[in-house]
Image: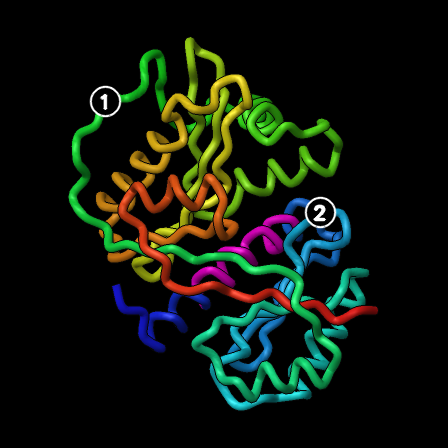
Amino acid sequence: MVIDLELARRLERVDALNSADYALTLARLEPGSRAALVPLGPGYAFGMGPDYPINKMACLEFTEPDEALLEQGEAFLAELGVPARISFCPLGRSAVLELLARRGYQPRHFINLYVRRVEPPAEAPLPRGLEIGPPRDLEEWLAASRAAWELRGTLQEARFGQVALERPEAVSLVGRVEGQAVAVGAMRVREGIAFLNGAATAPAHRGRGIQAALLRERLRRAWEGGCEYAAISATPGSTSARNIERQGFRLAYTRLSLEKPR
């Protein structure tokens, strides 16, 4: 599958706005949190604060370098008390990457973005004893998330779980084995693209095909919703990346995350 500049712009914009949904949902649940989305010309800065993982700038790599926009985004993130971070798609302009280097940004990590066209779903049996559906309530979602992600159960983790569940138009699913919710997965559709995220399974239930089943269910829903593409990200070389490729996804590109030391 060939990823051209137009599709890369679309993927990055949709992914950025989907991430920003977390910040906007936290702002609604906690008006005093200062979580927000800030437009930066063609791009965005969005953040939840130091207790949360979603704080960065995005979509600034496709136009001429603009130092003023970078300064605006850096100021917003500094007010939140988090480092200045930015994502960079390799189809972006090298001049923007050069500007980031001059401003002291350093590589932080890589993430693979995988894409596939959404097609009519093939029939596949669920693993024995597994059922998939929306969480019955917030408590079940939080319990499943704690088990799947091996969380400690802190107040911040519970709030992030609530934010994930209450994002507008998000599809949140749990996998239940004998009635017990042991796996989670989510999806958000924008502009005909279904971005899949938030997938994990409790350790005792891994290796049974539960995540593959959750992925197929989200692709089925994407097809029913009229989506053109499905996208998902994973750490290069990870087990998740291999499982994603088995479901027909192909590597679109490897995105670079950069951070400016304080």
- Please state the extent of the stretch shown in magenta in the rendering: 13-26
Task: Check disc 2 and give the amino acid type.
Answer: Glu
Q: Residue furthest front?
A: 237
How far separated are the C-alphas under marks 2 and 1? 42 Å
User: Which residue is located at x 59 percent, y 27 percent?
Assistant: 142
Q: Is the magenta stretch mostly helix, strand or loop?
A: helix
| Residue carrying label 2 | 30
User: Which residue is located at x 73 percent, y 74 percent?
Assistant: 74
Residue 56 x, y percent position in the rendering: 64, 64
Residue 163 x, y percent position in the rendering: 59, 42
Residue 84, above or below 192 = below
Task: Check disc 1 and give the amino acid type.
Answer: Pro
Q: Residue 125 carries which label?
A: 1
Which of the marked residues, 2 or 1, is nearer the chain's N terminus?
2
- Circles 2, 1 touching at the beta carbon (< 8 Å): no
| Any part of residue 32 in sight | no
Q: Which mark is residue 182?
A: none
Specify how the rendered protein is coloured.
Answer: rainbow
